[in-house]
Amino acid sequence: MHQLYDLATGPLLYLSLSLFAGGILVQGISLIRETYTSERFVFSFLSVKSALLSMVHWGTPFGSTVMRKNILLTVVGFLFHIGLLALPFFLMAHVLLFYEAWGLSWPTVPGWAADTATLFVCIACLFFVFRRLLVPDIRYISTPMDYLIPVLILVPFASGFWASHTLPGFRVCHVLHILSAEVLLSAIPFTRLTHMLFGFFTRIYTSSEFGSTRFAKDW
Amino acid sequence: MTLQQTTLHAPIIDEGIEKKLSGLTPETIRTVIDDVLSSETGPRLKAYLKTCVHCGLCSDGCHFFLSFDRNPRYSPVGKIKETLARFIHDKNRITADVIRQAAVIAYTECNLCRRCVMYCPFGIDTAYMIGIVRRICHRLGVTPLYIQDTAHSHSAFMNQMWVKEDEWIDTIHWQEEDAREEIPDLRIPLEKEGADVMYSVIAPEPRFQADLIYKAAVLMKRAGIDWTLPATPGWDNSDMAMFSGDNEIMGRITRTHFEAAERLNVKKIVMGECGHAFRSVYDTGNRWLGWTFPPIPVVHAIEFYYDLLKTGRIRIREKFKPRVTFHDPCNIVRGKGLHEKARYIIAKTCENFIEMTPNREHNFCCGAGGGVINCGPPYKSKRMQASRVKAEQLKNTGADVVITPCHNCHSGIDDILHHYKIPMSVTFMVDILTTTMETNP
Ligand code: SF4
Ligand code: SF4
């Protein structure tokens, strides 16, 4: 177990971080470069104003029509994304790690809030899986990967919760937590999780076209 | 209010689609797909495909999906799954049957209306992707018979309806003669170099709706506009090649249109009340030619009427009394944001206006757009089924008249009103303007 722990917090950590950062960087840069060489017209339609306006709408809960039509999904979706992105940075245990590594520290979320948020992220993952299984038009388009991704997210959050509460088997869970988080991180550039990056590109282009060429709202 | 859905009858056999299919092998199909994907698409498509998280939020944007009782096959992302995504992932297993199904989906089950784009959190443009499927089908020679006939007409005659040059000129003279009974000194100036405005129409006008040219002439006369029509190709601004996937002909059409304006040395082009034509000239065809924005100002009829009213060049004598509603055509609303200008015109000309819900950018497509109506009678029954939500939306207004400044919408809505027995009539904006404006400004 110790060896595995050392492996997970040593070489594997660096591997996953480089896969994540390298993957995102390479994909992002090559998208921009390819756009420049083969679809340069895209740049002539870009509009900062329209893109920002649209992003404010889509970044605000219920700021777009489709969000108002899907109230539950909007609430779950927003809270899930906030939890997913914020928890890793603001958990006491994680901030301690940053402090130990680089001597940096910042405010943390209180324990009860962290617990609630973690459990919420886990429930949201299950919600997404069940939504896929139960709503016919979503089941129709779902691939095995679509079911796997929420599980990839669920494991590090659930095991982290388990380990932090020193429940039975917490040592195993701790290692599982680190390993699964590394898998998740490495998967981002190579699965549909890339929407985290490409979603901005597509939104910027569409909202520019809508807002400044076609003078219509896209939310 | 939920209207009764009719069921689809016998399977549709479309000769245009069937003719080429028998000769297609998976190898030929693969070559064409790869060629289109590698030489005609790029990072934009890649980003759309990679970003889509299969969340299904776009489903509610599509009137096909809603009208067919939320059948997953008709959701925007469902259509991509059965077509483009399959083309990409199924490597060498794309058979003629897959192409047949893809052609049916791309040409007859998507109006390229872009409504779903507003429902996707990432702004993924499904209409653009369905356009690529059409392009592949076109390159394989698999296109519905009727729309292909229209594309042939464009290619041979540079207009949509096989109108010969002398027929066009004759029609103009005939309309001028008729209009002179109302206004004795009215002219429909053909080939007037240096006029302020070149007016262009779609070929169905001289073929079936010549009175619209008459009405445009009356409006121009009353407003005192220095205008002209070309006598040569370029008078027709319509473009079905854009929808059949024949980008080369699309480019020729838009170029001919611009060149006519250039030759006549006009200040701007005013296009009649058509949406798809505007999409071609302002957007798709124009871009194919390499322009970001058209090389000569292009104005849709709605913008033109708005300016005439705003500047007082035409004044309204008496407002139109019946209850009217307005159908926002996709190609000039999601395509140019003319919804408020249209409402200004209505406020000036009509006494009783009832908004339909949803409206403006969120209006439902008429079901005819994107070349779907041009795929002809074989698909009419399906088109009517797909328009159920549109029919309900129209019926719920309780209006007597629906105004829509687009030929496709006009025909599509006319079919819907008959099919669903809705007691409403459909009209163009110019009809309202010419009946309400002052005759001696
Ligand atoms: S473009 Fe219109 S018709 Fe096509 S999938 Fe989207 S909403 Fe449906
Ligand atoms: S809404 Fe966008 S991301 Fe979601 S399934 Fe549709 S196209 Fe894909």
Image: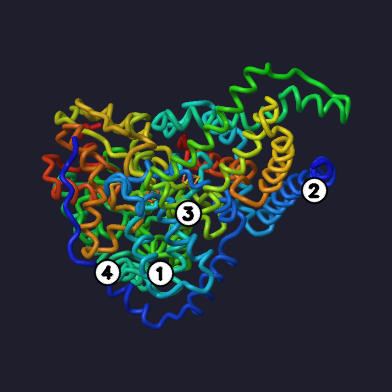
Labelled disc at residue A15: 2
Labelled disc at residue B98: 1
The numbered mark 1 sits on a residue in which chain? B
Residue B348 is situated, as x and y percent measured from the top left of the image, at 27, 27
Q: Which residue is mark 4?
A: B166
Could you tell me the amino acid type at mark 4?
Asp
Q: Are marks 2 and 1 on the same chain?
A: no
Q: Disc 4 versus disc 3: distance between alpha carbons?
A: 38 Å
Q: Disc 4 versus disc 1: distance between alpha carbons?
A: 44 Å
Judge left or right: residue A8 versus residue A49: right
Q: Disc 1 versus disc 3: distance between alpha carbons?
A: 20 Å
Nearer mark to the viewer, of 4 and 3 = 3
Dot 1 or dot 3: first in sequence order is: 1
Labelled disc at residue B128: 3
Residue B145 is situated, as x and y percent measured from the top left of the image, at 30, 71
- Residue B18 quadrant: bottom left
Judge left or right: residue A178 versus residue B98: right
Could you tell me the amino acid type at mark 2?
Leu
Q: Residue at x 31, y 50 (%)?
A: B71
